[in-house]
Structure formats: structure tokens, C-alpha cells
Amino acid sequence: MNTHKLFQIVTAALLIFVTISCQDVADEIVGKKPADARTINITMIGKSKANPVFLTARKGAEAAARDLSDKYSKIEVNIDWRTPKTESAEQQAERIQTAVEDGTDAILVSCSDDSILTAAINKAVDSGVPVMTFDSDAPGSKRFAFYGPDDVEVGEKITNKLAELIGENGQIAILGGNQNAPNLRQRVAGVRKAAEGYPDIEVVGEFYHEETAEAAAAEMLRVAEAHPNLKGWAMVGGWPFFDEALLKQLEPGKVRIVAVDALPMQLPYIETGIVDVFFGQPTFKWGEVSVQKIVEKIHLEEEVDEFNQMKLIQVWEDNLGGWSRQLRAWGYEDVPRKYLVL
Amino acid sequence: MADSTHHKTASKDSLSAGEKFAYGLGSIVNNLLGGAIGFMSIVLNVGLGINPALVGTLQAIPRFTDALTDPIMGYVSDKTRSRFGRRRPYIFVGAICVGVTFALMWQLPEGHSEMFYFWFFLAGSIVFYMFYTIFATPWVALGYELTSDYHERTRLMAVMNFMGQFAWISLPWFYAIMENDRLFSDSVEGARTLAIVIGIFVAVVGIMPAIFLRERFVAEEETDEDKVSLFEGIKNNVALFFQGLVTTLKQREFLKLCAGTFFLFNGIMLVGAFSSYITIFYVSGGDTDMGARYMGIFGTINTAATLLAIVVVTWLSTKLGKRRTFVVATFVTLLGSLLKWFCYDPLVPWKVLLPAPFIAVGMGALFTLMGSMIADVCDMDELETGERREGMFGSIYWWMVKLGMALAFGMSGYLLNATGFDVEMLGAQTSSTFFWMRVCDVVIPVVAAALSIWAVASFRITEERSFEIREQLEERRRNKAAGEPQVA
């Protein structure tokens, strides 16, 4: 055997050895979980299964659970989805209690009514189960953290944008949804607070209604008739645009509108120019960030801030395409194709 | 030139596979050292809480010290007279010292202030880069002089470039290794251990070229006129250094290669970040998992295509010559960059992978052909100046590459900001932001590739010319050996 042949054989053998060794190293680094890996079950309770925002929040939670399980070999994170079919604070309270009895490791909840849920949360915490809230808080409870928007700041942003659109003068109205919802009340307070900075803007009133598209649209039309000089709407929610009814009833640009939410069914209102700006909520992050925070607290044993602010994303004509694609990426399945190609 | 008219490499000019392999090992070490700090520096921020701006400063400062140390080392190596040669002693000592320094500089003690870590790491970096220069500059120069054959040089550089790719393949894994909680308690401990492993690898593998390779040239013998006082010697050497630097920078063919590399390499580097952002925020609509998946596949295709391109380009250069092969390969990259415009499609995201193999061709060709062409320039320079100055050429060339890379990384952030990109908007960037991001991502590398072709298209050292130069040099050396008068 000549030297050249020997060199080739040795090189080939070396390559095979290196490949096998690399496989062993790879198995060690990213392989199966060790036998003593801890399973962390996080019970997630949104307000309602019928509401798509909570379905995308679930996707965010599950994505974070997968990522964290991959990242940390000593834990396996599972999401236990226990959201009621329709909105019911009583059912949420029951599910918190059942989850504790079933031995859950942590609870993540968006409170339909904090006055009902505070007691259930406190009981869970007293039993040794940490609770975190998202979207809608129970600030008087023993929950260790909340992830959601700073509602006063959201209200201020709405006013500032609307003021810019109407040239900082004229009458505006506030559409407030459910008057008893604490987060909406704070947003309304934010709208009013910012409006004080515009001496030529007059707030004609706060208008509350049942949180359905029909009720909100009816209230809008009634106010418009009562205040014919109205120049703008500051809406702390996007209820009137949950269906297409107003697409034919409102004249684009006549009254400037800034509203919270930018769900797929609301996007035609941006396209037609009826709504100038939506402040969209990154609902995927409700689940994603909250699960990260829970793992930081119970696995890494790190200090977690009590208030974790979620930034809302401004959506208008210029970023309709980008926002639509982002919604699709978060799991919304009903985003019209025409917006995805913008 | 017809196939039959191409020169065949004479057996005396051929390098054995073992010699090429030994030189290629230096490439793995060189690339590993060049990339490791960048890939591990995230620990300084994530693990030790150092401000990202300070981390950026830590990476930028050595680029400026390199500007001085690289050409000095090139000059010193070119002028060294020792029984072990002009390059090998430095490669041997440099590899061991740089390996030890690398291992030590990451042994960051816990519980200190941000500025303590800054100064600790800065001091370590400066020493590290000094030893890195002592290893790398003579190693690069050695590659230019190992063979005097026009084609064998390309084959050597191909092996070097091919093997060097394996360092780039390993580098993206460093963070995952340091962060792995099966192996280490935290990323700082991971960095400490990884640095020791890398340091040992560098010291052991880095000395291989010094042990297994032989140098072809020696520095001129010292004459009686050269024997002067220490002060006089330093003064003379400083003057000679600057004289040599100016001569090198006046070498037009060399400058064409520098310009060709600068445009192509930095054009691609400058938009590297853009491609990632577009893939995540435009093509994947802000789905980071999906974007990361596509980027991973893109990287794999790119690497595989680069390895294949090195092989194809090496073969093609024996048919077309180096200059034409470079032009063809760079043109393929230009087309690949143009293709990106049509392949960024949020409705069909996998299309983002299509340009990857085309873009890789130019990059595969670049460091294969440029090293070989600089070796040809060194011959031409010897014919004109009577000196072998591989060290000087290599150091200036690679300093230009490193500086360009630092500028490209620095500028990419500003460019991204200029498009209006706002990370808080996630995938909901405006249409104009996405438009300008795509324009930059396509136009910059296309223009850069075109400029690179323009710069290299007039490179004068063809295969024929290279052999003429070689014949003249060999004749001169024969005459010199016979004691006949020289004509420069």
C-alpha cells in the first residue's frame, strides 16, 4: 500500500470518527431530557374561547413553552388551557380552584371581573401556586405580576394622535365600552388627561354601551346626530368595527377616528379610510411574555417586576400590510389575502 | 486561451495533499480566532451586563491597533533572518501565545463593576490581537510563497478556504454551547470553559503549519553595511518600513485586488443584517421561529454552496484564468443578489432560500482566487523591487478586509435606522420601510459586485504573464547564484 492510499484511508477513518463523536456531543447538548427534569404545568385561563385574541395568546404561550423547554434541559413546560367557552368570571374562578386541586405549578389568567377573581387568586397563592395576570388585571390580589398595557398611557396616545389629525381643535367624543371595566376606565382617564393639554379641543362626553358591534355602532350614530360638529372619536376599544355594518354608513375622513384594537375583521376600516389609526395589541405576546415571566420566577428564581408593560402598535394605512402579516404570524386565520401582499 | 495552451503544474511545483492540509489547518485557526470574539461577546452583555455600546467599543478598538501592528508584523516577518525561516518561528510562537491569551482573557472573575470588565477585557483583547497578528500575518505570507506555480497557488488557496469554512460552521454554535445548562451553570462559566477548549485547539493545531511546511525564500543576507548601532538600526528600519508601505500601496495590481475584495465582501457583509430582518419581519411576518428556521436553512445552503463553489472555481480557473473566473463568479453573486428582489414573498416564504446558492459562488471564489492572485502580485513585485514582501502584502490586504468588515457591521445599524425600521413595531413596519430595506438588501450587493468586477477586470497578471514573470525571476536567481550582475 503506498503512502497516498494510506493517507486517504486514515483521513476517511478520521472523518468517520469525528462524525460519530460530533453525534455524541450533539446528543449530550441538545438530546433528550435527563430523568430528573421537572415538568412545569402552567394553567392558562383567558376570558373566552370564542374570542380570537385569546386563541393567539394561547399560541404565544405554547411557543414560549416549547422554546423554554428547548433552552433549559431541566424543565419541560406544558400549557394547560382552561379558558371558558364564553366569558364568565365565575367559571374562571372555578377553574382556578380546580387547577390548584389538580396540582398545577402556576396560573396565568385574564380577569373577566377582578372583584370575583381576587378571592380565587388569593386562595391559589395561599396554597402555594403563583398566579400571574395578563390583559386584564386584578391589582388588589396576591398575583405576583401583570403583563398588559399601561391603560392611562394608551388613552393619552389616542388623544395625542387624534389631536394631530384634527389640527388640535374641535369637538371630540370618547367611546368607552363597559363603564365597569377598570382597564377601560383608566384609558378614558388617559384620554381626558391628555385632552387637558389641548385648550382648543372640547370633549363632548364619554359614551358607554354594551360591548357588541351593534350597540357600539348605534351609540356612535346617536352621538354623531346629537353633535353635528364632532370632529373626532377617541375610542378606547374597537367595538363598532367588529362587523362590516359601518363600512357603508360612515363617510371616510369626515370624522377622524382613533381606536384601540386592530383585529382582522377591523382592517377594512383602515383600508377605506374610515378609521385613521388603530392601536393594535400584540396578543400573541400575552401568552409568550407571561410564560417567560412565570419560568423566570419559578425555575430561575429571579425577581419579576410586578407590572410588565406591553406596548401597543400603531396601525394605519402605511403599515396595513405589515400588520396583517404579523397577525397571520400570530395565528389569526381570517386575515384577507389582499392585505398580506401590501 | 485553448485548453492545450494552459500550463500544467510541474511536479516540482506541486504541493502534497499533506502540505495543503497542514496549511489549511492554519486557516481553521485563523478563522476561529477572527470570529470567536464576535460570537462570544454576547456573554459580556447577557452574562455580565456590560452595556452593548461598550461591547461594541471593545470590538472596534483592536481594529485600529491592527492598522499599525499588521503592516509592522508583515515587514518584520519579511526581513527576519533565522535558521527556521521568516515565517515559521512566528507561526509557532504566535499560535501558542494567542491560544493561551484567548483562554485567559475569558477567565472573567465574578462580582466586579462594568468598567472593571471593560478594562480587563480591553487589555486582554489588545494582547490577544497582538499575538493573533504575530501568528496570522506570517501564516498568510507563507501561503503566498509555498509554490511558484500559477495554478497550484489556486489549489492551495482552495484547500485553505475550504478548510477555513469549517470554523465558520462551528462559530454560530458557540452561544448555544455557552448557554447550555447541561454543561454549565451560566453563560459566563460556559465562556470560560469554551475559551480554554478553543485556546488549546488553537495552540495545538496552529503550530502545524510551522512544523510541517518548508519555506521557499530566505531574507537577504546581512551585509557589513547593515551592521549598525541599535538606534541606527531602528531608525533605518522605520524608514524602510514606511518606504515599503508606500511601495506596496503604489502597486496598482495589488490595489485592484484590494478594491475588488473590499467591494464584494463588504457589500455582502453590510446587508447581512438586512437579510435577517427582512426574512423575519417581512417574509415571515414577524414570526421569529419561522424566520429563524429559514435563516438556518439559508445558512446551511449557503455554506454547502460555498464549499461546492470553491471546488468549481478552482477547476474553472485552470480553464479561464483567475481574473475571468473571478468575474464570472462575482457576476453569479450579482445575479443572486438581484434574485432576492423577486424571492422575498410573504405568501411563498420558502422562495427566500433560492438566492442562497448563487450568492455563495462569489464568496467561495473571493478568498480562493484573491490569495492566489496576491501571490502572483508578489512575484511581479519581486521583479520590480527585487524583494519578497508577502508579509507586507498579506498584512495590508487582511487589515483592509478586517477594517471593511468592522465598518460594514457598524454601518448596517445606521442604514437600518435610515430605512425607518423600529423594532418595537415588530412585523408591522410601514410599506416604505420594507421597500427601502429590500432596496438596500438588493442594490448594495449588486452595486458592490459590479464595482468589484470593474476593479478586477483590468488586473494585468494573466496566466501567460505570470509564467513570463516566473521565468525572469528564476533567471535572475540563477544569475545571482552564479554571481552575475543584477538588473532590477
Image: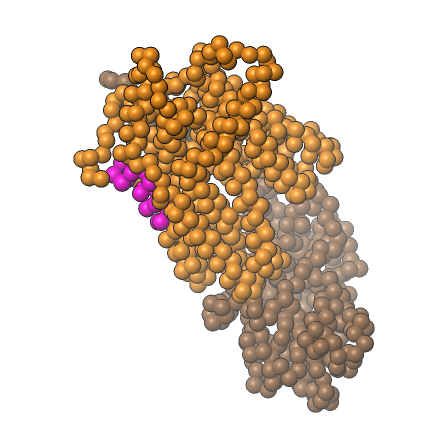
Chain colours: A brown, B orange
Looking at the image, is B471 positioned above or below residue A120?
above
Task: Please name the residue shown 56% across and 69% down the image.
Answer: A318
Tell me where residue A69 sits by quadrant: top right
Residue A318 vs residue B300, the one in the foreground: A318
Q: Main secondary structure of the magenta part?
A: helix
Task: Please name the residue shown 69% across and 60% down the image.
Answer: A148
**Residue B263 spot, x, y in % from top left:** 45, 45
Task: Please name the residue shown 70% across and 57% down the image.
Answer: A309
- B404 in magenta: no
Task: Tell me the quadrant of the picture where the N terminus of chain A can be found.
Answer: top left
Looking at the image, is B334 positioned above or below residue B38?
below
**Residue B4 spot, x, y in % from top left:** 18, 35
Provide the residue span drawn in magenta. B316-332
Residue A129 can be seen, yes or no: yes
Tell me where residue A237 sits by quadrant: bottom right
| Farthest top residue in view | B224
**Residue A124 spot, x, y in % from top left:** 73, 54
Instruction: Give the left or right position of residue B359, taking residue B407 as reference.
Output: left
Residue B183 can be seen, yes or no: no
**Residue B67 spot, x, y in % from top left:** 56, 33
Q: How many marks?
A: 0
Instruction: Give the left or right position of residue B209, taking residue A159 as reference.
Output: left
Instruction: Give the left or right position of residue B212, taking residue A69 as reference.
Output: left
| Farthest left residue in view | B4
Task: Please name the residue shown 69% across and 46% down the image.
Answer: A297
Residue A137 vs residue B369, the one in the foreground: B369
Looking at the image, is B140 positioned above or below residue B79?
below
